[in-house]
Image (spheres, rainbow, N blue to C red):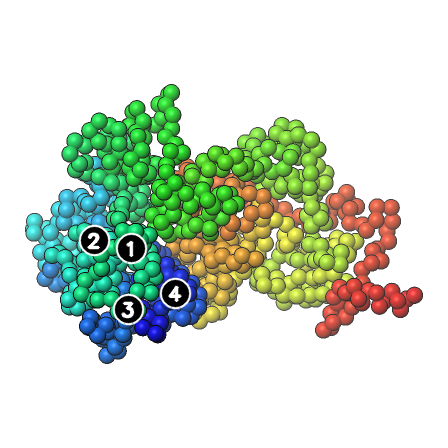
Amino acid sequence: MNARSKLLVVGNGMVGQRFLESLPADSPFDITVLAEEPRAAYDRVQLSAFFSGKTADDLSLVAAGFFADRSIALRLNERAVSIDRDARRVRTASGLELEYDVLVLALGSYPFVPPIPGRDRPHCHVYRTIEDLEAIRASSAGMRSGTVVGGGLLGLEAAKALRDLGLETNVVEFAPRLMALQVDDGGGGMLRRKIEALGVKVHTSKNTKSIDAGQDGRHRMSFNDGSALETDVIVFSAGIRPRDDLGRNGGLTVGERGGIVIDDYCRTSDANIYAIGECALWRGRIYGLVAPGYDMARVAAQGIVAAAPSRATGAPSSAAPAPNAASAEPTFTGADTSTKLKLLGVGVASIGDAHAATPGARAYSFIDERREVYKKLVVNEDGTKLLGAVLVGDTDDYGTCLQMMLNAMPLPEYPEDLILPPRAGTKAVGLGTLPAEAQICSCNNVSKGAICSAVENGCTTIGALKKATRAGTSCGGCAPLVTQVLQAELKRKGISVNTHLCEHFSYSRQQLFSLIRVGGLRTFEDTLAKHGRGLGCDICKPAVASILASCWNEFVLGAERASLQDTNDYYLANMQKDGTYSVVPRVPGGEITPEKLVVLGEVAQKYGLYTKITGGQRIDLFGAQVHQLPLIWKELIAAGFESGHAYGKAMRTVKSCVGSTWCRFGVQDSVGLAIEIENRYRGLRGPHKIKLAVSGCTRECAEAQGKDVGVIATDKGWNLYVCGNGGMKPRHAELLAADIDKETLIRYIDRFLMFYIRTADRLQRTSTWRDNLEGGLDYLKGVVCRDELGIAAELEEDMARVIASYECEWKKAVEDPMTLRRFRHFINSEETDPNVLFVQERGQIRPATQEERRERADAVA
């Protein structure tokens, strides 16, 4: 075969996309991909986030330019309908015929809908694609209730989606408990109580007999026990079935209960056809999780590339060739189906033999009804090996238990110590005995050895490890374990990651913040005397000054604090490249009266300042010399302006669109809320600058999703986004809460900002802080929205104290003669700085360049 081999991939879901990514960029194939859906691969695991504000673009798994860069032909909306194995050709529903040398079937699965009379009624849906979700959202508009048929993993995800849409939500399950395959009776009971406490009604042991027209709702679901349930929207999420029809009709071997049979190399009964993911049956088993599919994708990709030269000879297609024992070609050896996830905010984990089905298995159970925690360990007969576990309500032990089970690690003397509070004299089970090949991140097949290697190569933070290894970047469930391995490896290798603020304080910024706040320390001198040493430096002085301002909100230029500030804070203005300063008055929400506009123009004209409207919807005045700053600010304060804090590590601006007041698309008053928020948080100081925005609708004219705090109006309230950044490393903000009222919104912003201020490192933006936050977004939601740390009231009180103590720093400065004395160019002279030189450009001044300065000096000489 002289031409490049043709590789045809049918299916571009998560597993199909991972297969393409596993091929080398210079693979010896002409590659074509058939995608049945109208868009390329997206994250089905996070599908319910679509109802929480995520868009299809947010869920996309395809990097920009991926297909073009690799010369892959992607055909969307193209469904394969038949395989001609003799001609090596695939036909599509549109009549297209594509030849192949190698065919990869990544067909996935389809939702199982029980054969219930009435299942085809309007507003009955399945839960599988973005199009399904769009249909569910359309059906839910203006409705009161929704019901999910199925109480397994997918069913509870669908229930979350209905609840996010504002519907009264029911879950109907045929089995006597929720998640019957993953948890036992004790765990299922605890899970049910926790979910019902969230307002979701659970109906177990219910066999739906028929679905008919309802009286109080669109549908009436009648059950075999004689009871009934009326509801407006029905979502079937009762399991999946492998999509094997293409292989079955093409004559491939298919399992008795479905699934295209594959060998350890992911080859079907035809040597030139591979099957991966949920459509594949390996040793009688279908895997319904993404991680095993990813493993299959890697095995198939490496095997296909390795066999590429031999395919030129035209290998027979009737049967797979015998594996070469000497070959290094990888094989699929099965996968662990242990699971850890959040279902409607409830932590649930199932590991290994959760039902103690192994002969001789023994179990330990722990129930804490007050904290609503259930834990169960399953061990072998002599108690030396962990076989399985169930965790509900508290899944912190998942990583340790999973690794002990996977690697057959010896149990401690008292196995129950793994799930009970530590007893005196016992040692915690460490991860140091894990072998290098132990899989830490199952989604991306990242081993302990890979993490250790990344640390050896310089990765010392979670953020760096994620970038280098992809560990923790998919479902995020392994993040705590990744952190433990990182810390253990750093300690073992003697790599010291110094979190001390500087040589004068042996504490991180977070630790020092707590010491200052709890100790009620008000000055740098007191802080240094109690917790530091030496005289301080240019690192710790402004850092402590920032902490003091965040805690107590006292005047930053007070007698005991002025010397701590850097240049910008010392002069309450941003120094520019030529030694002059900018004047930036606050313009809350970007709204300004004509009278104030006139004042700004008059001041700029009087003092010869350069004026510019900034991206934060303010007017900046540039070119002010030190001695002019108090004079300018006296005039601005008299006109009603106040400091915009453009010079400080503080809350800067709240950008807004015009909202429902003027815009025909606006659904809420974004300007009014932006002004309220800016006036609330003005003067708030933190580890770094903080920017906010409010958009009046999802058209997003205020660019709220690129801000530290972004608010977007919906027809039901407000969506709150956090940790965005439009700076040197842009980061899209993440949805923290959806469709909340204004009072809840303000509470959540209070908590979020104060939690960030308490825990971030020095000069750390919210985006970087979030990337290194162990537990990720769900942990942040737990702190801010669910108060899982029990500190919400404390955070709100801290913010209330800051708000109540606000004073305009420039107003205080111009009224204090002692403060005004520092606004001089020279200590012993009233002269101005002779080195300031401007030139005219576009009708305004700008700093002279070095060449222009030399020309001016030559002319004077």
- Towards the viewer: 569 or 381: 381
- SS of the residue under disc 1: helix
Residues under numbered marks 2 and 1 in contact, where contact means CB atoms less than 8 Å apart: yes
In the rendered structure, which disc, 3 or 4, sits on the residue that comes first in sequence?
4
In the rendered structure, which disc, 1 or 3, sits on the residue that comes first in sequence?
1
In this image, 209 relative to 450: left or right? left
Q: Is residue 411 above or below residue 620?
A: above
The residue at 22%/27% (across/down) is 382
Q: CA distance from mark 1 to mark 3?
A: 26 Å
Q: Residues within 10 Å of mark 1 (few under 14, many from 20)?
A: many
> In the figure, residue 407 lies in which quadrant?
top left
Q: Which residue is mark 3?
A: 313
- SS of the residue under disc 2: strand
Q: Amino acid at mark 1?
A: Met
Q: Is residue 382 above or below residue 263?
A: above
Residue 282, numbered label: 2
Residue 27, numbered label: 4
Residue 296, numbered label: 1
Residue 386, position as x, y percentages in the image = 26, 33
Residue 714, position as x, y percentages in the image = 39, 61
The residue at 58%/63% (across/down) is 615
- SS of the residue under disc 3: loop
Residues under numbered marks 3 and 4 in contact, where contact means CB atoms less than 8 Å apart: no
Q: CA distance from mark 3 to mark 2?
A: 28 Å
Q: Residues within 10 Å of mark 4 (few under 14, many from 20)?
A: some
